[in-house]
Amino acid sequence: MRKYTSLIAPLIQAYVSYQTASDRINESWECRLFQFDKHCKTNYPQATELTQEIVDTWCLQRGTEKNNSCRGRIGPIIGLVRYLRKRGLTEATEPIPPRNERNTHIPHAITEAELADFFRACDEMPDLPRTKAHLPRTLTIPVFFRLLYSSGIRTYEARMLRHEDVDLVHGVLNIRFSKGTAQHFVVLHDSMLELMRRYDAAIRRYHPSRIYFFPNRDGSHHRRTWMHDNFRRLWDKYNRTHAVAYDLRHNYAIENINGWTGDGFGFDAKLLCLSKSMGHCNVEGTKYYYSLVPGMADIMQAQSDGETVIPEVAYGESV
């Protein structure tokens, strides 16, 4: 739990408590609010209420900042302003964020050989030294990355996954920490379910009363740096191409869509199921992947009587 130290800290903490009770808080928002608290303490040490000047000086787009970076930085503060205004605790108005920029990241098209090499590296992790800090890592990493590969969930959804939200009887994940308000459910493949069951029994020896399904050494959830560093190290062990952990989600979508070629009338129903499973707010967000599948755009064009099937997708739905 971060400790806020400015004179408006009670207001920030009240907002954090509200978001936590609503299960809508995440580490990125907490980090931004903590930075904002430092901004208040450094530049407005005597301020006991949230003023328009405080909001404006923080939310002003910086010269080195792109639109989406600015939106990510000021988003939690906009939420804070809305929360306080509804309760009559500030007269400040929320700023207008810069426009959304389209995501230009092109995911790596992962090959079967690269996947095999990556998971071989995951499984080759040594189980020495046999310490409480190291052994859970060798248990967690092969399961964590296989879950990303087999389910298509977002990386932070896996990191924030709670033990109580994993149904190991029926094989269903309750993804409550998702983008926006898109809480959704994911059904596990039978082989992944069995792997999750074995992992649960093994990790229980180190964290018998854990909150998160994949706990770190302190019992909390893993940070982004843990995931990125481990993925980079294991991917680079045998592969010479560049990829990131999020590419496993893109691979999941592409493999599913490729598997529908020639299925005819069942396409729409499968697309809807894929959209729901991946946590998209609507099917339009899932159509983004058409452009990533070799040949799929031409196939869809032929099956749609000439209508456009590769839409412009808002940034928030492109991942």
Image (cartoon, grey):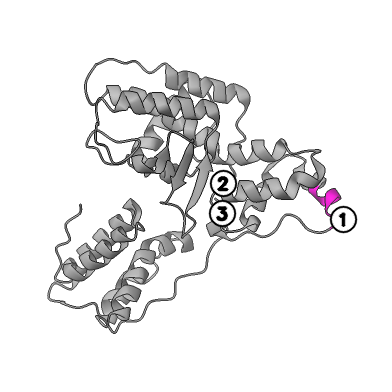
Q: Give, as a three-letter code, the residue at label 2.
A: Ser
Residue placed under numbered mark 3 in the picture: 280
Q: CA distance from mark 1 to mark 3?
A: 26 Å
Q: Where's residue 65, x and y in %?
A: 42, 61
Whether residue 49 sits left or right of residue 183 in the image: it is: left
Q: Which mark is residue 36?
A: none
The span shown in magenta is: 300-306
Residue placed under numbered mark 1 in the picture: 305
x 43%, y 38%: residue:
167
How packed mark 2 is, by other alpha carbons closer than 10 Å (few <14, some 14-19, many 20 or more), is some
> Closest to the observer: 63 or 203?
203
Q: Give, as a three-letter code, the residue at label 1.
A: Asp
> Closest to the observer: 233 or 280?
280
Q: CA distance from mark 2 to mark 3?
A: 8 Å
Question: Can I make out residue 287 in this image?
Answer: yes
Quarter residue 232 falls in: top left
x 35%, y 64%: residue:
76
How packed mark 3 is, by other alpha carbons closer than 10 Å (few <14, some 14-19, many 20 or more), is many
Say whether residue 48 is magenta. Answer: no
